[in-house]
Image (spheres, helix red, strand yellow):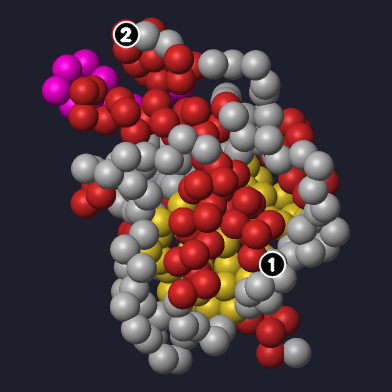
């Protein structure tokens, strides 16, 4: 299958695989939150995770600061891989915006892209505008990040770890806050949105707004969990949804 792009992490699809899920996680994260999901997916379904610059083995690279650069690197990687089956794009939080942008770029060039799955993210037209958290001073920035939850206290209190992680996390916040998804036609592929019933950061209506971003089918999957659906018991709910979407996509591809 050739050399795998370094932005994609995980075993290349097996010869008998008919579904490839390409996933990107939340702000500040690399491939680690997503890779465990792959072992729980059904037969014929494989998962690869995005590892952007500035994290994990790419920690020494400068992170992207705009959605176009993020999406272009991912899209170039997808264009280069050799896979004849159906592709499902999956993004959690910031990853949802990035994969939406990727789908917009590639839906004509790679008709194998059969669905977009987004979780814990407001739709582009319902994003909160005007915030400039990426410009906060260091202490204020970490207080803001800590107020959202999901970040171990010992990590945010560790000066060395903060210094290591802050440039990438701050860049990811800039990507989100400068994102503009308007003035474009809806996607032609189905969109499936996942929302945790106890999410206090993004509400149901904001997630349901993804229905406006497709001319195809839209499904809202409500699951038991909060905003951080890739960790703890909620990750099992995400796997269940992904398996259901993969099975439906496989049936559609088979005619």
Q: Secondary structure at mark 1?
A: loop
Q: Is residue 232 left or right of residue 118?
A: left
Toward the viewer: 144 or 52? 52
Q: Is residue 226 left or right of residue 39?
A: right
Q: How many marks?
A: 2
Image quadrant for the C terminus? bottom right
Which quadrant of the structure image shows residue 160? top left
Above or below for 63 versus 88? above
Q: Position of residue 162 (x, y in %)?
A: 23, 23
Asked if residue 172 can be seen in this view, the reply is yes
Q: CA distance from mark 1 to mark 2?
A: 41 Å
Q: Which residue in the structure is indicated by mark 1?
A: 107
Q: Residues within 10 Å of mark 2 (few under 14, many from 20)?
A: few
Q: Position of residue 94 (x, y in %)?
A: 52, 40
Q: Position of residue 241 (x, y in %)?
A: 58, 60
Above or below for 76 versus 50? below
Of marks 1 and 2, the one in the foreground: 1
Which quadrant of the structure image shows residue 81? bottom left
Q: Is residue 159 left or right of residue 46?
A: left
Identified at 40% across, 56% down, the residue is 50
Disc number placed over residue 139 in the picture, else none: 2
Toward the viewer: 198 or 172? 172
Task: Give the magenta part as a residue range.
Answer: 148-161
Q: Position of residue 146 (x, y in %)?
A: 37, 18
Confirm whether the magenta stretch covers residue 154. yes
Asked if residue 221 can be seen in this view, the reply is no
């Amino acid at each position: 299958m050739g050399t795998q792009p370094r932005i994609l992490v995980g075993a290349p699809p097996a010869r008998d695989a008919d579904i490839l899920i390409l996933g990107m996680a939340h702000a500040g994260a690399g491939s680690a939150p997503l890779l465990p999901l792959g072992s729980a997916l059904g037969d014929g379904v494989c998962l690869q995770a995005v590892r952007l610059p500035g994290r994990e083995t790419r920690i020494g690279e400068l992170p992207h600061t705009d959605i176009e650069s993020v999406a272009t690197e991912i899209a170039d990687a997808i264009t280069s891989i050799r896979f004849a089956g159906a592709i499902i794009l999956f993004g959690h939080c910031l990853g949802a915006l990035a994969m939406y942008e990727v789908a917009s770029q590639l839906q004509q060039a790679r008709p194998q892209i059969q669905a977009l799955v987004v979780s814990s993210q407001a739709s582009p037209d319902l994003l909160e505008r005007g915030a400039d958290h990426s410009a906060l001073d260091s202490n204020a920035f970490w207080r803001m990040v800590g107020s959202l939850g999901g970040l171990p206290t010992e990590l945010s209190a560790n000066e060395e770890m903060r210094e290591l992680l802050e440039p990438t996390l701050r860049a990811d916040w800039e990507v989100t806050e400068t994102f503009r998804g308007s003035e474009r036609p809806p996607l032609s592929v189905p969109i499936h949105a996942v929302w945790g019933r106890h999410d206090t950061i993004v509400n149901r209506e904001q997630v349901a707004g993804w229905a406006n971003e497709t001319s195809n089918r839209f499904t809202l999957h409500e699951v038991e969990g909060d905003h951080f659906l890739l960790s703890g018991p909620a990750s099992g709910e995400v796997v269940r949804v992904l398996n259901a979407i993969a099975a439906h996509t496989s049936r559609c591809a088979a005619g």
